[in-house]
Amino acid sequence: GEDVEQSLFLSVREGDSSVINCTYTDSSSTYLYWYKQEPGAGLQLLTYIFSNMDMKQDQRLTVLLNKKDKHLSLRIADTQTGDSAIYFCAEGEYGNKLVFGAGTILRVKS
Amino acid sequence: NAGVTQTPKFQVLKTGQSMTLQCAQDMNHEYMSWYRQDPGMGLRLIHYSVGAGITDQGEVPNGYNVSRSTTEDFPLRLLSAAPSQTSVYFCASSWGTGTNNEQFFGPGTRLTVL
């Protein structure tokens, strides 16, 4: 079955870059997503990448996709304390029936 | 637009009780879904609907029923609650197709079954 794996925890200093990694198994996924969840809140879409792209940049966020290795990463430049949250990688065909990773807790130290 | 709304925010049930988690969206989205979130695990899909009158099972459907009589509402029913259903439940909606087909999530319902 489909599976998405992420590292569970990442700690960085304010101002540094954060890199959150994700591996997935379903090569038919059309889109790959990064969601952010702040404490006590629902999930908020951060960014996404279409499966025929290698990279996407959106302000401080850079998504890299290696289809051969089924590896997705999210880089947050100049990480701020407000970036502290849980980050979920997800895959899905046309965004439906998403399969989520377990989430990476990002802790930003000031 | 209110987006995706869920009620209640918190609920405590005893084993065997039934209840309905409400979900509504005002974006005219065709696609709606229910997920549960458990510690150390990602969100898992319970049931989803591609339009009014159409529902289907997700990854973990056992113990839950859904119906979709209108485009706006997608309630999730627990017929006989069990402690294993203690979780945070999220409802989501989307257009179903499109450029990125972003799923919009509600704020969640935290359910405890004693």
Image (tube, coloured by chain):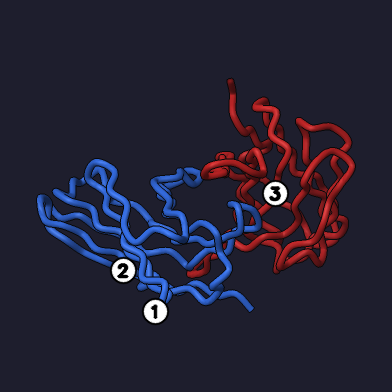
Give the numbered dot on residue B33: 3
User: What residue is shown at x 85% (from left), y 41% (from top)?
Assistant: B68
- Residue of label 2: A9
Check if mark 3 and mark 1 are on a common chain.
no
Looking at the image, residue B83 sits to the left or right of residue B65; the answer is left
Q: Earlier in the sequence, mark 2 or mark 1?
A: 2
Q: Could you tell me which quadrant the N terminus of chain A lies in?
A: bottom right
> In 3D space, how far apart are the residues under numbered discs 3 and 1 (Cα atoms)?
30 Å
Amino acid identity at mark 2: Phe
Q: Supply the letter of whichever chain is blue.
A: A
- The chain holding disc 3 is B
Q: What element does badge 2 sit on?
A: strand
Question: In the depicted view, which residue is nearer to us: A10 or A45?
Answer: A45
Looking at the image, residue A37 sits to the left or right of residue A15; the answer is right
- Residue of label 1: A69
Local crowd at mark 2 within 10 Å, few (<14), some, or many (≥20)?
few
Q: From what the image shows, is residue A100 above or below residue A47?
A: below
